[in-house]
Amino acid sequence: MSNIEVFRSEARAWLEQNAPEEIRGKAGDPSWHYSGGRKASFHHPAQERWFAMMRERGWTAPDWPVEYGGGGLGAQEAAALKQELARLKLPPPLEGMGLSMIGPTLLQVGSPEQCREHLPKITSGQIRWCQGYSEPSAGSDLASLQTSARQVEDRFIINGQKIWTSGAHLADWIFMLTRTDSTAPKHLGITFVLLDLDQPGVEVRQIQMISGASPFCETFFRDAVADPANVIGGVNRGWTVAKVLLTHERSGSGPGNRPGTSSISRALAAARDKLGEQDGRVRDPIVRDKLAQLAMDQQCLQLTMQRSVDSRKAGEKPGPETSIFKLCRSEVSQHHDELMMTINGPEALGWEGDGFSEQELTQTRAYLRGRGGTIAAGTSEINLNIIAKRVLGLPD
Amino acid sequence: MSNIEVFRSEARAWLEQNAPEEIRGKAGDPSWHYSGGRKASFHHPAQERWFAMMRERGWTAPDWPVEYGGGGLGAQEAAALKQELARLKLPPPLEGMGLSMIGPTLLQVGSPEQCREHLPKITSGQIRWCQGYSEPSAGSDLASLQTSARQVEDRFIINGQKIWTSGAHLADWIFMLTRTDSTAPKHLGITFVLLDLDQPGVEVRQIQMISGASPFCETFFRDAVADPANVIGGVNRGWTVAKVLLTHERSGSGPGNRPGTSSISRALAAARDKLGEQDGRVRDPIVRDKLAQLAMDQQCLQLTMQRSVDSRKAGEKPGPETSIFKLCRSEVSQHHDELMMTINGPEALGWEGDGFSEQELTQTRAYLRGRGGTIAAGTSEINLNIIAKRVLGLPD
Amino acid sequence: MPLLLTDEQKLLARTASEVISKQSPVSRLRALRNDKDELGYSPQLWKYMAELGWTAIPFSEADGGLGMGMAEVVLVTEALGRGLAPEPYIACVMMGAQALSLGGSTQQRTTWLPSIIDGSKMLALAYQEPGARYDLCKVDTRARRDGDGFVLEGDKHHVLGGFGADALVVSARTGDSTSQNGGISLFLIPTDRAGVELGRQWRMDTNNAAIVGLRGVRASATDVVGKLDAGAQLLRNVVDRATVALCGEMLGGMNEALDRTLAYLQERTQFGAIIGTFQALKHRAARLYIQAELSRSAVMAAARALDADAPDAANLVCLAKARCSDAYVLIGQESVQLHGGIGMTDEHEIGFFLKRARASEMTFGDAAFHRDRFATLSGF
Amino acid sequence: MPLLLTDEQKLLARTASEVISKQSPVSRLRALRNDKDELGYSPQLWKYMAELGWTAIPFSEADGGLGMGMAEVVLVTEALGRGLAPEPYIACVMMGAQALSLGGSTQQRTTWLPSIIDGSKMLALAYQEPGARYDLCKVDTRARRDGDGFVLEGDKHHVLGGFGADALVVSARTGDSTSQNGGISLFLIPTDRAGVELGRQWRMDTNNAAIVGLRGVRASATDVVGKLDAGAQLLRNVVDRATVALCGEMLGGMNEALDRTLAYLQERTQFGAIIGTFQALKHRAARLYIQAELSRSAVMAAARALDADAPDAANLVCLAKARCSDAYVLIGQESVQLHGGIGMTDEHEIGFFLKRARASEMTFGDAAFHRDRFATLSGF
């Protein structure tokens, strides 16, 4: 048995013996997920036990170095552990942008001191992070950001406004892009800085979306203070760090990567329910045709993603097809939600209260929320620009 | 009875008495249409009689001045005559770019001498005209044309190549745009000139299209000669003339204005024939839905055109909706032909010979030819640019 | 019937547009929504609309109306749609009261129409049933004969303008349905009659809509609107007219959303350029404009065809509703997309248009429904 | 079955691509067309393909083949599609001979397959009938019993590679059709047998296709391919494999058309700019690229599913053919549009791809047909 298989069987045995009964099968249930931080509490004793036992093994961050509270696992071991967790449908003991974004970035470009300062607080669930990239006038054109950081004596004074700071109302610290040189070309005057949100100069407001409540916030900085020790990658060199972090957001478990290719099973059930069936077929032939198209679109995309995974597994560089995933996923997901609106018909018009089922209300909110799928984390327009330029080689 | 009603009833009586029996009902049949010129002949004695009697009344060009062989009718009389011709489904006695394009342009911007020289030869069917605008490297960007006209003593020497010179192989003269000043800004060095094609320096080649034979030609000029008397609007001032002419092409009976909104009756008949029917319905529900969509697209466009006509009749300026006609017409027509391909299925694959009906073969060629509908006479892309700029006011 | 506005119609359109742009900014709808206002509209503004004569437009002069037609109605609803005005013009004037206008007895008309026209009373049409989707004839509510009268039992939902209405015109099954349209009757039922239960239905457009329960509601023979057992055709006529009125509203909404999006394209800067200079966005904007223009033609033609009682009027109703449904949803979605992140926030107003677009789409049949009906009417 | 090429497969793909790009420029297809060449392909190049082993790929080693699978077949057909090569690889190897390979008797296989593999003989599959569209089971050709044998009577068209073929595998009705797939048998009929009439069918793609008349053609029991009355399933299996082979060809064609269009966008100047800088065209080009990539994944998956005899193989065949049909037609049409006027001329080669796209779309079922079949296979 290879080392990796030894590791897998040990991990499996340990999980089967120790994972609390209450959390098994709960992988897809958000109420069992835990993001840590000063404001967090456990919703169930089993959740706390699970977090504590995993943290003790360093398995809140299995592939991070042991010295920062990680598990010290190699990539193959970490993958095996992930599969074993999935086998029992166990929720991750801890999640959030600390683990998925700023942590990996610090490991890659942070100084040892910065790693020592911040990473253990992530792995131990002490500090929850959020992201401060976008600004109202810097959307797709991120580098045009204007939030300023002025160095005054031994600190940076921050002024400006960030938007789409997901979870800022629940987070403790923010990693953010600031402008430190307004005279330099726009990519060259940017500094990447870490900041404690719990200070007088910071105000967080939750954003109401067209679909209702949301995790998004606006965050305002009025003479907020950051420690120069928390500048990552050097003053005016933040754009490089930003790009490193974006690769983690896009490749990893960041918010841009949620499965957008839900199967058609819900739509199919709704179609049978609302439109009836005949000899096993969805009765409305137009909707049936659209269901088939949707299922096919999903499958084509899934196969294309599988193709990419397979070639990466075989040691090949990911091909240009990866550039289409985010765009296609968000559009297929929108088509799904649009078809659900059609199927639900008048029952799709509910906002709350009587006269609509829970499922109908949820679906309508999902439709509205999903309109942002082609906007957030790179608009479809930007993605098409990128494909045209980088993949197809069309000139600027 | 108003003057116009008197005219109408007289015209009707005259037509009913004199129009040859053989040509009645032949308005839609191209074989009964006549374009004149040195190379033309009549295909039937009735066609010749019809032409001669109409010409005698000046009704080959009813609203042109009598001195140029026209009928001298006012706009309302001319419209009434057109309606009376349509009532008996009579083909026009004469047609072509002389009547529809260069004639109206000369009447508007030509000198009296130029009118006296050229217009009678048009109304009498002696000279057939063609258009020399596009060049291989000047498609949508018409003003970038390069065919040169050099003034040498008492004549212009023309060198270059024109493309899409429809009917050049049947025409006698060409009206064309040439470059007379290559140092000026591109719109300012263009001269509009008329030229006899029957000379050694001109070579005409017919263009084979993806749909087979076509009226299109390439026309090559090698030291061809034009008379300075045939410069319209002045040297280097041809762009203005070109724009005048284009308004006639677009508004009038030019080739850009063919009805693109054929009804769905052929598609419906084909669908019933190929796909069957059930209780009077087209059996294939997907095709039925597409047929309804097509019929609706056609009707929406027709109503929009009617709206424009109605407001012009009421003395209002044509609204911005006119900018969409060419684009929509060509696209609806393409959708029609695409649906016909789907309905005909394997039988849509015929090129010639056995195994396909005449109707199937014709439809397949129409599909291929129709792909040019969104390219010729202003591509859809250019039309969208124009709408965005002139109608919606979006900046360059 | 030329597709033109007469001078009188132009004047009406201009007045309506001015009133709505002054009295009904979208912020008003937002405030009503945030307050969870159960009526969902402004009774004061409704009164004002009545004073302006809007509520009188489609009624005969004999009934105290202005004797105008759908051509005028759509001018008013277009203005309402531009401001997303939540007043139940379509629900009350074009549905509840229209049923009386087209089919009511003299007594019903004289009792109700003057108070509708002066804005003092509200009527609604309760025809839609759970699970019936867009089928007017799928009616499970029963009106059982009881002596000289009837007893109604059943449920209605999406009763537009029904919450707070003074009376409802209710469809119910009175006979058997051997003939497709047979056996359905309309009843005029005051909402204070015993057994009528009204609940507010909260929809994404926040417009006034009610859930109606009929629990052994008694009705007399004089409560029947139109002929007994022949209510389906009357209902169809009312809904066809209301559909075109709604198309007018949709036309206003889609044009307003488009105008706002065009303004945003001319104002927003990214990568050092106004985003309206990006050709891909220009072409999409031009496509949206085309759909809005095609919609306008269809709505004008449908209104005139109804006014002229033209043989193809029903086809044109389908044409208008199918086109407006597709166009408004497209423009609504694209408007949010072209606004980017800010368009996804509730704080920005553009999202209200998308919600209204969907609510309108799902009222009186979506585009696929009307393509199917169009095909059937066209004999294929 | 990972969606990857093995090193051997990469080598095969490279070889095929090189051979085709050298030996089969589109000008060759044009010349064959202009000459009205009745065979429609080059026997020399066919021989060479056989020498390269391409004709041996899908046959078992026992039959003298290479024992490879659909994963390899689609690499060859993709290369063929790039050059629009008119050789009847799909028609002969993947249809006529495949019927024998999958269902033929030992005698049929040993008689025919070696000569197919060495390129000396040609087989075709005559299954399509006028008016049957894409339904394999709509067979009006009858094989009437006559003593120990049969007499065939009927008409076939769109018989790919049939003109000049040495023999045809013909579907005919032998039993009644009480069961949906029942009563159809396949017969192996040499084209020189009495009563076989062959005519060239001229299609827009100019590929070899025949109209076949069967006028009292005699067949013996040993001419039956597979089990009597159970030919429908065999036919379905053959056509499914041929469909995926065709998808490979379509993939090659759409990618070649796309590459040529991208090159044109980078070369053509209008208004002083390379037209590839226009954002609206960029976005459209990116959309075309996306469709080509999705098509590739579907084709790879379908080929591997057939090779693995996976339970969802038929679904994946539908997936691949529906996607490739829509994508190739879209790319074909957009390629012509983006080339502008020159793309409409026969002199330019891009139009050949549009014609091939349509011919491929209408072979083995269009996208709507395969969506319907996919839904049925998926149980909805």
Image (cartoon, coloured by chain):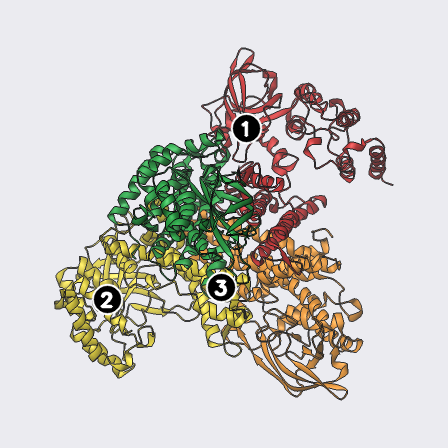
Chain colours: A yellow, B red, C orange, D green
Q: Residue at x 69, y 81 (%)?
A: C189
Cα distance between the residues tagged 3 and 1? 48 Å
Neighbour tally class for label 2: few under 14, some 14-19, many 20 plus, Cα within 10 Å: many
The answer to whether mark 3 and mark 1 are in CB contact below 8 A is no
Is B382 situated left or right of A259 in this image? right
Amino acid identity at mark 1: Tyr
Mark number, residue A99 = 2
Q: Which residue is mark 1?
A: B133
Location of residue C313 with respect to B32 vertically, above or below: below
Query: Could you tell me residue C175's position as x and y percent?
Result: 72, 79
| 2 and 1 marks on the same chain | no
Query: Could you tell me residue D28's position as x and y percent?
Result: 41, 31
Where is residue B28, by image quadrant? top right
Is C58 situated left or right of A391 in this image? right
Q: Residue furthest top?
A: B153
Return the chain for callout 1: B
Q: Secondary structure at mark 3?
A: helix
**Marks 3, 1: nearer the viewer:** 3
Q: Would residue C266 be visible to someone looking at this image?
A: no
Query: Could you tell me residue C323's position as x and y percent?
Result: 59, 57
Location of residue D353 with respect to C260 vertically, above or below: above
Q: Secondary structure at mark 2?
A: helix
**Marks 2, 3: nearer the viewer:** 3
Amino acid identity at mark 2: Leu
Query: Could you tell me residue C249's position as x and y percent?
Result: 61, 62
Q: Which residue is mark 3?
A: A339
Q: Would residue D273 be visible to someone looking at this image?
A: yes
Location of residue D295 with respect to C60 vertically, above or below: above
Q: Nearer the viewer, residue A307 or C69?
A: A307
Is D261 situated left or right of C370 in this image? left
Cα distance between the residues tagged 2 and 3? 36 Å
Neighbour tally class for label 3: few under 14, some 14-19, many 20 plus, Cα within 10 Å: some
